Amino acid sequence: MAKIDIVIPCYNYGRFLERCVRSVLDQKICDLRILIIDDASTDDSLTVARRIAANDARISVVAHEQNKGHIATYNEGLLDWASSDYSLLLSADDVLTPGALDRAVAVLDAQPNVGLLYGHAVY
């Protein structure tokens, strides 16, 4: 089974963060790690992130003292931290549908020439 690293950047989205992370943890794939990067939020995002991480060893939190913006934050997670077979950048206000990671891994494992995979948004 493939390993997956999931990077969740968060800026003032504390109200969405728990649902986002729960949607990842509810996936059938258990060999995953989650990095929540709080980009100097002014709401309770960091408190929420730390509370979530305290309950699951697969979750780590990085807190920026100054806002670094999207690209620097994405690069920190995807280029500096992620090291698994696959990685996913997931916005803190998004949720994964049930089975999303299983389907993605099945496609990527079956088609090694595929470098990027995405799903359609469900509203």
Image: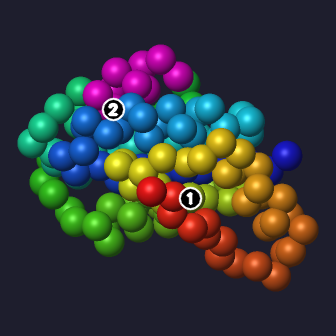
Q: Residue at 24% across / 44% down in the picture?
A: 13
Q: Quadrant of residue 110?
A: bottom right
70 left or right of 3 in image: left
Q: Earlier in the sequence, mark 2 or mark 1?
A: 2
Magenta: predominant secondary structure element?
helix
Amino acid on which the number 2 mark rests in the picture: Ala
Is the residue marked by circle 1 packed among few (<14), some (14-19), or many (20+) residues within 10 Å? some
C-alpha gap between disc 2 and disc 1: 18 Å
Determine if residue 64 is in view: no
Q: On the image, numbered disc 1 is attached to which residue?
A: 88
Q: Is residue 13 above or below residue 58?
A: below
**Residue 92 picture location, percent across and down:** 36, 48
**Residue 116 picture location, percent across and down:** 65, 76
Q: Quadrant of residue 109?
A: bottom right
| Numbered mark located on residue 49 in the image | 2
**Residue 8 picture location, percent across and down:** 42, 50
In the rendered view of the protein, which quadrant contains the C terminus? bottom left
| Numbered mark located on residue 123 in the image | none
Q: State which region is magenta.
A: 48-56
